[in-house]
Image (spheres, grey):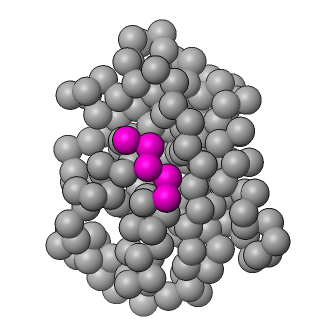
Amino acid sequence: MKKIVLRYFASFVRHCDRNSLFSAFWSGDAALLEKLVTDIFERSISFYDSHPSFCHGFIAGLFIGSGYTVQSNKEFGNGRPDVVVIDEKTSSVALIDVKRTDDPKRFAKLAGDAERQIRLGEYAAPFKLDGYLHISHWGLAFYKKQCRSFFTAIW
């Protein structure tokens, strides 16, 4: 069953126009990103699949095959972001931490907690040393099929 779901999701994303998603992502439009990710999540999977590792894989999968370099669970700075997306053409990197909760009361705060983890863990340090011009932090939180985000940029 898992293989069927993953095959469906890969096919769905491949045929989905992600240009608006990528535009919102790189420009820091958190409200639009939330709407688009929630929409894709709602149309593609069951909320029973929304456990933490699935949400992490879902986010990484959105960027696969799009011309970006995608890294998952690699150590940077003093920690390990869930997903790193690199756009070599624009010398941009996005550090993403993904959280999930079953508690609707925690949902609103969780994306900010995820972004704070990136900042406090200094995940951006190696990218600054490597000369990346644009570094952004994305904290993403999931509750059932809903997404919330918290964005900061280091220019």
Task: Give the magenta part as a residue range.
Answer: 27-31
Our reading of the magenta stretch's main secondary structure is: helix
In the rendered image, residue 152 lying in the magenta stretch gets the answer no
Residue 77, image quadrant: top right
Task: Work out which quarter of the rendered image holds the N terminus and state it.
Answer: bottom left
In the rendered image, residue 29 lying in the magenta stretch gets the answer yes
Q: Position of residue 32 (x, y in %)?
A: 42, 60
Residue 20, image quadrant: bottom left
Count how many numbered circles sit on residues in the image: 0
User: Could you tell me if residue 145 is visible in this image?
Assistant: yes
Asked whether 123 or 136 is in front, the reply is: 136
Please give the name of the residue rendered at 27% of the width and 70% of the height, measured from the top-left corner. Answer: 13
Please give the name of the residue rendered at 37% of the width and 41% of the height, measured from the top-left corner. Answer: 27
> Is 98 placed above or below 100 here?
above
User: Could you tell me if residue 63 is visible in this image?
Assistant: no
Q: Position of residue 45 (x, y in %)?
A: 44, 83
Determine whether, in the image, residue 118 is placed left or right of residue 16. right
> Is 129 placed above or below 136 here?
above
